[in-house]
């Protein structure tokens, strides 16, 4: 819920609307926060996901000032990149709910090695998609995208409630 509210705050601040979303009847910029919250709460999970995806895409396009002729191709590559990064992270998350203090030395070494391997996979994937993106947009915009992505991730992490255990074995993606 906090992510949705944070996203709505960003939407309001940037004055963006969900032009490409299934929900085109709403002028998000002119709605007050209570109205936006009510509309979002009435959306199905699939509609919420689509709305947030479209908002993210619109925000990235606006932030990077992507040429109209390149928008469709860029968004396709960008969404592939995000899906690929998510798939890689999910490989680690499925086995990351543990307490490092209860692991034996061998188990801890294995988890640490696994986190290094995950970090390398994420980096390799990022390089791969940076090359793909540079075929659509200039290198400077790819760099700006990764920089902005890192800042947004840091902001979201600040807002996450801390769980009862330490997640030191979960690697952090660096911009």
Image (spheres, rainbow, N blue to C red):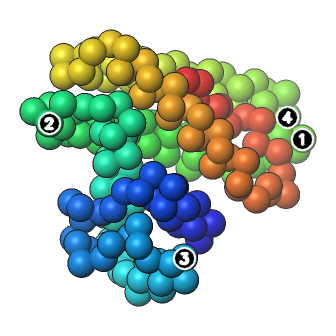
Place residue 47 in its image quadrant.
Answer: bottom left
Circles 4 and 1, Cβ within 8 Å, touching? The answer is: no
Q: Is 8 above or below relative to 85? A: below
Q: Is residue 113 left or right of residue 91?
A: right
Badge 3: how crowded within 10 Å, few (<14), some, or many (20+)?
some
- Reading the image, the residue beneath label 3 is 33
Place residue 101 in its image quadrant.
Answer: top right
Q: CA distance from mark 3 to mark 2?
A: 31 Å
Circles 1 and 3, Cβ within 8 Å, touching? The answer is: no
For marks 1 and 2, give the one nearer the viewer. Answer: 2
Q: Nearer the viewer, residue 10 or 119?
A: 10
- Picture residue at 63% right of the left edge, 66% below the top: 2
Q: Nearer the viewer, residue 107 or 32?
A: 32
Badge 2: how crowded within 10 Å, few (<14), some, or many (20+)?
few
- Picture residue at 83% right of the left edge, 51% below the top: 165
- Picture residue at 50% right of the left edge, 34% below the top: 149
> Whole-percent x and y of residue 125?
39, 23
Circles 4 and 3, Cβ within 8 Å, touching? The answer is: no
- Picture residue at 18% right of the left edge, 17% below the top: 135
Q: CA distance from mark 4 to mark 3?
A: 49 Å
> Whole-percent x and y of residue 152?
56, 41
Q: Is 60 above or below relative to 174? A: below
Please give the label number shown on residue 101.
1
Circles 1 and 2, Cβ within 8 Å, touching? The answer is: no
For marks 1 and 3, give the one nearer the viewer. Answer: 3
Q: Residue furthest left?
A: 69
Q: Is residue 124 left or right of residue 72?
A: right
- Reading the image, the residue beneath label 2 is 68
Badge 4: how crowded within 10 Å, few (<14), some, or many (20+)?
few
Q: Is residue 93 left or right of residue 112?
A: left
- Reading the image, the residue beneath label 4 is 104
């Amino acid at each position: 819920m906090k992510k949705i509210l944070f996203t709505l705050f960003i939407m309001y601040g940037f004055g963006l609307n969900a032009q490409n979303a299934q929900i085109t009847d709403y002028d998000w910029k002119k709605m007050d926060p209570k109205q936006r919250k009510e509309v979002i709460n009435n959306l199905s999970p699939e509609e919420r996901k689509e709305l947030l995806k479209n908002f993210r895409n619109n925000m990235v396009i606006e932030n990077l000032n992507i040429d109209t002729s390149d928008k469709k191709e860029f968004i396709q590559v960008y969404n592939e990149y995000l899906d690929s990064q998510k798939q890689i992270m999910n490989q680690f998350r499925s086995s990351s709910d543990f307490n490092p203090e209860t692991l034996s030395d061998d188990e801890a070494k294995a988890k640490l090695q696994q986190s290094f391997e995950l970090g390398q996979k994420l980096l390799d994937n990022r390089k791969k998609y940076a090359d793909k993106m540079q075929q659509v947009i200039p290198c400077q915009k790819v760099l700006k995208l990764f920089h902005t992505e890192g800042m947004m991730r840091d902001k979201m992490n600040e807002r996450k409630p801390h769980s009862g255990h330490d997640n030191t074995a979960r690697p952090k993606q660096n911009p």
